[in-house]
Each structure stands twice: as C-alpha cells, then as structure tokens.
Image (cartoon, rainbow, N blue to C red):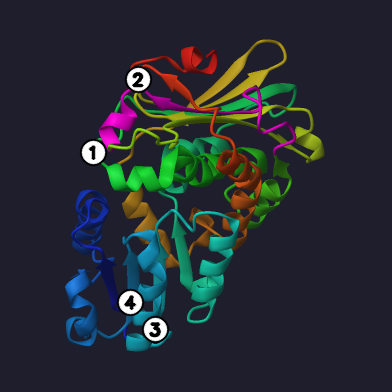
Amino acid sequence: MSNKKTYIIFGASGDLAKRYLMPAVESLRETGEVDNLVPISRKDYGNLKNLIKEDGEKIFHLAVPPEAVSDVVKIISDNFGKDDIKIMLEKPFGNDLKSAQSLIEHIDQYFSEEQIYRVDHYLAKESLQKVVTEKWDRNNISGIEITAIEKIDIEGRVNFYEQTGALKDFVQSHLVEMISVVLAGSFDIVRREEALQNLGIICDVSKHECVKRGQYEGYREEVGNKDSMTETFVSINLASREPAWRGVPIVLSTGKAFDKKLTQIKIKYKDGGEKIFNIEHEPKAYERVIRATIAGEHDLFISSSEVLESWRILEAIQRTWEQKKSDLIIYKKGSTLNEVLSI
C-alpha cells in the first residue's frame, strides 16, 4: 500500500481555501508531509476519477456551503469507496439539533466516525493550548468569561450572515469548544464531551440577564432586509453541573463592529484577581489542523457527540428566538462590550 498523502479541496475557489487552506497545504508539501494537492470546484464533480488518480491516503477537505456537504460526502463514497479516506468538515455542523443529527446519520452511512475530522481551528491554536499547559489556580473561581469581539462588520458576506448569525457562526463552535477545554482542563476529546454534557443554561432565556442578542446599527440597510432579526452580537450565561464548577457563572459573548478585536478567556477569582488568556490570530493553525488529520489525532477536532451537545445547549435559545421578535437590541458601531451589555 502506498504511503502517499493526497489532499483534495472541495470548494477550492472559496475564500477559506484561498486564504488559509492552499497556503497551509503548500507549506506541508514543501516539508514532504503532503505529496499531492488537487483543487476541486463544482464543475469537476463529474470528473473526479480522472482528476484524482493517485494511490495512497486521500484527505478530502470540504470547504463547501453546509447544504452541499451531504451530496459531496456521497459523491466521494460513490467514486472512491471508503478505504484510505479521511473527510475534513468545516462549521457549521447543521443549523440546529435536528439537522445536526440528520447530517451525522447521513455521513455514518458512508464513513465511520474515525474517518471524520470536524474542524475548529481554534483547537489548534497554541494560545488556546496554554489554558492546559500553563499552571493556574483552578480553585476559588468566581466566574469565567470568554469573549470574542471584532472591529470589522460582516464585510459584505450578506447571504452567509443572514442565514447564520453570531450564535451559529461563533458560539456553537468556537466559544463552546473553548469553554469545554477550560472545564475539562484538557484537549482530550472524551473529557471535553463530559464537560459539555454537564453544561447548560439554567436561567430564563427570554430575559436579557440570561441571553442577550443585538444587531449593529445599519445592518438591516447593509443586507437589504428592514425586518432582519439576525444577531451580530450575542451573550449567554451558562452553568456546569460538575461539582468542581458548580455555582461558577460562565458567560460567552461574541459580536461584530465593536471598538476593538479581542478574543480572550478570563478566569475571575473570589479575591478579585484574574487570569487572562489572550487567544491570538495564528496563520499556522491550519497547518496544524491538516497535520493532525494526517496523524489521525482526533483531540484537535470536534466529535459528533460534541456537535450534538453544543446544539442541545443552545436549543432553548433558538426556540425562544423563533417566537420572540422584540428582544433584539440595536447598538452603535464602535461600542465597547460593556456598553452593549448595559443596554
């Protein structure tokens, strides 16, 4: 059997592929970790066997819209079977608990869970790994706050953002995964799953004190929808049933068009002290993601169980938002996080 590694990008003309995936793979080709790169666009779907002739392991990275994932998975299976294949998937993994379950069941028809690598590149960031590797006091904690705000707005990504919003775009994936690492004290996938199983919302999601969603001023004009309820900001309060974390309030906040860019994990202590982890932009994160896929290291990826637990945690919010149309706050571009939280 050949030891060659062929990396195939579906959605090769997209922004993710151009900005992050292609440069990462080219770097890995230079080091000999990847042998071949095959970019695939929609027009190539009927000609895959002629484009991908290499022996050895094939790594398919699906940088395609969420609605295309099911079809592409089947196309890969129909053309190449299931042996010596790994599938890398990008968020969002479904739109809610029901759709996520359906997607997982669909993929299970063609490939095993061991062959699936659900990407959250934050798990590959060295700055997040410091949460586990650095020594810090895990006792006498009065609160945990994870914040990811940006200075930029949606930057013209109208269709994507109108269909997604901040809850699906950032909370369900990045913020939930970051809190799972903090609570687990580890990147171990089983311990992260256990942390999420014990995590939930115990307050009234219809109240701003529990869940707050907002939209920056001018967003509706930008997307051409005067009635849009899509949130560009969300802050949610969570709690863990684990004895070690019982009674410790957990706040996850994310948003666009703020006064600055900041991604931060803040551990607050009862004596007024704080431990802060700043999560940095790391261009090499996708290299580590692809390298981990080659090595079969699942701890840097999201399991199907984690996907379902994250949607379970957020399900009550989604149901409430479907029915309630009066809780959206409007904030000015350039606001501070405290200013928006105080509205």
Q: Secondary structure at mark 3?
A: helix
Q: Look at the numbered disc 2 and give the secondary structure of its residue.
A: loop
Whether residue 4 is visible, yes or no, is yes
Q: Amino acid at mark 4?
A: Lys
Residue 77 marker: 3
Identify the residue at horizontal 28%, vertical 66% (top origin): 33
Q: In the rendered view, would you say 341 is above or below 197?
A: above
Q: Which amino acid, by three-letter code, is at mark 2?
A: Lys
How many numbered marks, from 0 up?
A: 4
Quadrant including the N terminus: bottom left
Q: Earlier in the sequence, mark 3 or mark 1?
A: 3
Point 45% across, 38% down: residue: 166
**From mark 3 to mark 2, how far is it between C-alphas?**
45 Å
N-term-proximal mark, 3 vs 2: 3
Give the Cα distance between marks 4 and 2.
41 Å
Which one is nearer the viewer's eye here, 15 or 234? 234
C-alpha gap between disc 1 and disc 4:
34 Å
- Residue indicated by mark 1: 156
Q: Are marks 4 and 2 in contact (CB under 8 Å)?
A: no
Q: Write the start and end of the magenta stretch as one range.
A: 201-223
**Which is more foreground, mark 1 or mark 4?**
1
Q: Secondary structure at mark 4?
A: strand
Q: Give the number of the mark in front: 2 or 1.
A: 1
Disc 2: which residue: 260
First in sequence, mark 4 or 2: give its number. 4
Give coordinates of residue 81: x percent, y percent. Answer: 40, 88
Disc 2 to disc 1, C-alpha distance: 19 Å
Q: Give the residue at the far front of this rendering.
A: 226
Q: Amino acid at mark 1?
A: Gly
